[in-house]
Amino acid sequence: PTCIRSLHETTSPQIGQATSLYHDNILPGDNQTRILQEALLKLNAALERRDAQIGDLKKEINELRQFQSNTGKTTRISTTPSMHTLISSPKNLHTSAFVPIAATDKSRPVILPTNTFTSTPAMPFTMSLAKLLPNFSGKECEMPTKFITEFEILASGLVGNSDEYLLRAVQQSLSETALTWYIQTQQEQSVNSWTQFKQLFIRRFRTPGKIESLRGRLRSLWQSDNEPTADYFERLKSLMSEIEPQTSTDYIKRKFIQKLRKDIRDKMSLGLTASLSDLVQKAIEIESSIIQQK
């Protein structure tokens, strides 16, 4: 019929034009391979630039950590958004490599090898330890044994019991004469363990002259009028332990009663046969009774 023929003649040129456009967009195999290779070259170039940036960041981080190791102090490494993107995103940790593409009928995905970025463990310092640990400068009035005892208790809770961490932490507790001694000792011999440090430290600062000076302080030590009995006992025990770390309990009991305030000592009903803790507790009770009567 005339209407059908007219419709066919109208649509046929459009179909032919579309078909021609479709075939024009299909490139030969060599051209398609060339375009894919150019795209891959651009991708590899971008990855190489990214790898170079990652390498620079790793060097900066390692330099900061090396600085921490040398100084024994903590420097917080703050990352910018770009650093975070470069380091934390797994897709960015690729090694650049050019993989040639052969002309094949089927396209295959390009798989690039990946690198793993591992961080170096750092000392668990979260703040300035100098403000938290006891200080020792080497003055005549200071007690080296007491310092070591207090340092071990506090430092072990902050940095653990590792020899390396304790040796690095103690550098922040030493000052003046003591710090100078430690620096000179490290130059003369390598101090690698905490036990070795303690032996050298006690040998240097717990001298016969120091012990004799402490004995003089013990002879003149008395509980003061307004000093709580518990504080007096701790002061007495600390001084006696510094003079002789293996002081017998009986000797401490005798000195405790002897150095008590007279108004407390006169009311002590317990003798040396009682335990040290019972003697101290009894003295505290007498002290409380005296305060209540005032």
Image: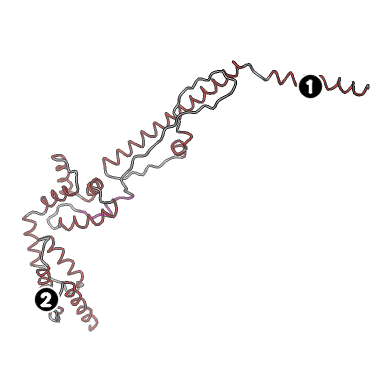
Dividing the picture into quadrants, the one containing residue 250 is: bottom left
Residue 188 included in the magenta stretch of the image = no
Residue appearing at x 14%, y 54% in the figure: 139
Residue 130 included in the magenta stretch of the image = yes
User: Relative to residue 111, is residue 158 drawn left or right?
Assistant: left
**Measured from the top left, where is residue 10 in percent x and y?**
85, 21
**In the rendered structure, which amino acid carries the disc numbered 2?**
Thr
User: Relative to residue 132, is residue 220 drawn left or right?
Assistant: left
Viewer-proximal residue among 215 and 176: 215
Task: Tell me the element at label 1.
Answer: helix
Q: Is residue 88 above or below residue 102?
A: below
N-terminal label among 1 and 2:
1
Q: For the N terminus, which image quadrant? A: top right
Residue bearing the label numbered 1: 15
Q: Residue furthest right?
A: 1
Residue bearing the label numbered 2: 273
Q: Is residue 188 above or below residue 103?
A: below
**Measured from the top left, where is residue 198 in percent x and y?**
16, 51
**In the rendered structure, which amino acid carries the disc numbered 1?**
Ile
User: Relative to residue 158, is residue 102 drawn left or right?
Assistant: right
> How many angstroms separate mark 1 from mark 2 (CA)?
119 Å
Residue appearing at x 75%, y 20% in the figure: 19
Q: For the C terminus, which image quadrant? A: bottom left
Dividing the picture into quadrants, the one containing residue 77 is: top left
Q: Which residues are magenta?
A: 126-135
Task: Tell me the element at label 2.
Answer: loop
- Crowdedness of circle 1 by 10 Å Cα count: few (<14), some, many (20+)? few
Q: Residue furthest bottom?
A: 293
